[in-house]
Image (cartoon, rainbow, N blue to C red):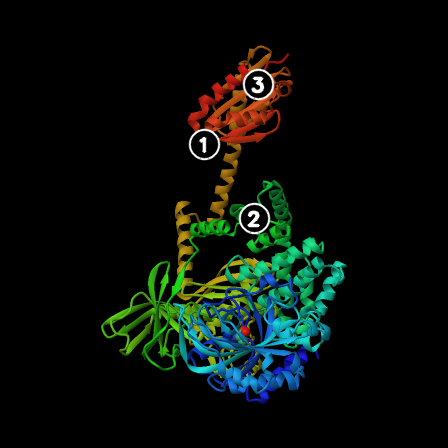
Amino acid sequence: MQAKTIREQFIQFFEQKGHQQVAAAPIVNKDDPTLLFTNAGMNQFKDYFLGHKHAPHPRAVSAQPCLRVSGKHNDLEEVGADTYHHTMFEMLGNWSFGDYFKAEAIPWAWELLTAVYKLTPDRLYVTVYGGDKGDQLGVDQEAQRIWEQLIDKSHILLGSKKNNFWEMGDTGPCGPCSEVHVDIRSAAEREQVPGHTLVNRDHPRVVELWNLVFIQYNRLANGQLRALPAKHVDTGLGLERLAMVLQAKKSNYDTDLFTPLIQAISSISKHTYGQSTAIDMAIRVMADHVRAVTFAIADGQPPSNVKAGYVIRRILRRAVRYGYTYLGFEEPFMYRLVSVLVQQLQTAYAHLKSQQAYIEKLIREEEEAFLRTLATGLQRLEKLSQALPKESTVIDGSTAFELYDTHGFPIDLTVLIARERGLQVDAVGFAKALQVQRQRSRHAAAVEKGDWKKILDKPSSTFVGYDQLEANAHVVQYRMTKVQGQPRYQIVLDQTPFYPEGGGQVGDTGQLRLGKDILKVLDTRRENDLIVHEVAQLPSDLGVPLQASVDKAKRMHTASHHTATHLLHAALRQVLGLHVEQRGSLVNEKYLRFDFSHPAQLTHREIRAVEALVNEKIRANIALTEYRQMTLAEASAMGAMALFGEKYGERVRVVAFNPTFSVELCGGTHVPATGHLGFFKITASTAVAAGVRRMEAVVGAAAETLIHHQLALLQTLRGMLKQPKDLEKGIQQLLKDKASLGKQLAAYEAQQTQVVIDQLHGRFKKWNDVRYLITEVTLSNASALRQVAAALQQVTTEPGFIVITADIDQKPYIAVALTGDLENTWGRNACDIAQALAQPIQGGGGGKATLATAGGKLVQGLPRVLSLAEEMLRTTPQPV
Ligand code: SER
């Protein structure tokens, strides 16, 4: 049974049981500060479980790409080493939001596995939560009893908190779980060792297939469990493992989900899979990692230096490292696998196809950059391990940090390479060094969060800010947080006019008035489905009705820039072509920044054309048309493009300014008609990444200010040039004059240099057989000093030693020249001598063996340079 069919049958089975199919969420988690990546199908439903939101359907089913590479669920180290863990995997799941519970969830799972997928009951084992003292919970007897109706008692095992209590992260919804494990060993092996002894023992062919979680609690920040208002079901079945079982394979990598990738890697590398342990592992790492990186980029998270982007970069680098070391790939190769993956998964995940070229380009560039540093980094590591004292097996933290900092080696990569050489890495020392660096760059904006405290028991966060900037509201819940040690509070209202940061648009600011208290709203953000208002203090009474007012001027300027972004997007597509797609955007009250796909730098003419088109649309004063409740299909029919990396609900909002010009899916706020923008001006056009360009622009008052400043600057320049008729000509004349003065000056300096040379000619002295000249000179630039030394070098062919110094604009300079064979007789060249002489001026220099110069910081040291030179002359062995 192909993976595609397995996926479809799962969905169909639960659809028949009244479940609504829900689209997968992006693999990158943008709205939940507790999680970088989607690590389970349930993430997108978190607020339903916690009771913050009502689920639109009581039952749901989905196939969800998940990434377990950071935080509580991190399998990265296992990936490739074994045959059944992955960075990115697909989780098939069914959910009940306060609807059915164990009595349905368990028998349905059993029915699907045994009646639809036809697994042999004898090969299945189930685990049930055995309780935990710390959490004051007992054995899940309810689940136990239900299983006893379905499967032989000897196949039911009790499990620990570690295996049978599922938690999404350090905080959040959780509950006891029951897992189904499968034993796919041969009959002989099963005869020898009974399957139940291998459950949860990391056996590659006795593996967990499906986890049925009974969500009943919320894990609080203080570690305690709080019962949730309703009971829910959250299940997750690993598609790759199920495919292994149903396709009668011994490893996930032998299923049709991986074989095309493995074949591609084999044919590119000319290494056959299944011949050598190390090579096989490298091939698995690559086949796995390309999936994670591709999905992450397609969902809007390119590799980068921070947070989620850095995790993706590490995954990619891990693959490159394996390819380089074990398969001999010295050129980029991962990007060549993207097409294979897209070909395979495009029916289930159509967005991969439309992003393919972009993903390939990004991966390729990333690979090129890393391959460049990999070779030098590996050499450095090699040297280090050889230089370690015999008895030491630990690479110290600062070295690991150097590898990280200058060679871009993620610490897990260093650990891995070290491990292959039988060495360890001082992880604590590394962490310390990293911490010091972080503190230095003051990026560690530590945010601690308390638990939500309910004030009102009602749904929250209805957004009314499209139509009004003020609203009466109530506090539904609040919590305390700390930002860099400073207390802050977060407040959630039943309804709010405050726009939460999203879609590139900044969050609103403004105030909440509760009785006599006025709270300044410093920022508004979205956290899953909650709209969170950030304030610095709490009011005396949180229970009173309040008035929420948005800062109108700021919102108005921000909305103008948001509308301008839409016009810019449409204009770019019209001027440059339909390949232009949004890659990122920032909109605030001061300006807009828009990133888009386009292969080349924009010409002047193109920029002008875009600007002119936007301004034309502003002057046409096109009214906003807004559709708040369209289906995605209706929106696409109107021409609205879904942005990659965005999750859209069942109903979408469409914003159009003339449906034949600009139609976009957008949750942001806009002006009623384009005329409000006044005037549009592009202020920057740059490159941000391969194939991605960036534009910055301003409209309205911000554009007016910009133009005002530019005109004022012109006015000032006119004034400085005594009001010339033609400013351009005036400046040209100025530049001409400057050039001719420059020439005169150069001629004068050359003359001066010649005078100095002539004066010094006759001032050579002799010490034994060495002719020497050690003196200070007066010159106006450093290159003249070198010229003088070079000219003096021509004076004699006998052994000679020339040291001249100069104070040029309060900076000390030295020139050293040697003649004859002095360099050999003394055994010191001019560079060494210049270095030594530069000590008193705290400087350094270089040059050629017979002519070198040095500069320094301490002009007072110059006399000492001269006396040092004299000493050197007198103490250096004399020519024979
Ligand atoms: N959330 C559970 C898991 O990830 C079941 O889906 O295992």
For the residue marked with disc 2, what is the amino acid?
Leu
x and y, in percent, of residue 109 in the image: 58, 83
As drawn, which residue projects farthest toward the front?
192
Q: Position of residue 724 (x, y in %)?
A: 43, 47
According to the picture, the residue beneath numbered tag 1 turns out to be 857
The answer to the question of whether label 1 and label 3 lie on touching residues, with beta carbons closer than 8 A, is: no
Distance from Cα at disc 1 to Cα at disc 3 = 24 Å
Let me know if residue 763 appears in the view: yes
Q: Which residue is mark 3?
A: 801
**Residue displayed at 51% across by 26% down:** 814
- Sooner in the amino-acid sequence: mark 1 or mark 3: 3
Decide: is 874 above or below 448: above
Residue 551 location (% of width, % of height)? 34, 70
Measured Cα–Cα span from mark 2 to mark 3: 45 Å
Q: Quadrant of residue 304?
A: bottom right
Residue 25 appears in view: no
Residue to which mark 2 is pinned:
403
Q: Which mark is residue 198?
A: none
Q: CA distance from mark 1 to mark 2?
A: 32 Å
Residue at image position (66%, 78%) is: 123
Asked if marks 2 and 3 touch (Cβ < 8 Å), the reply is no
| Residue 324: quadrant of the picture | bottom right
Ligand 1 neighbours mark 1 (CB distance < 8 Å): no
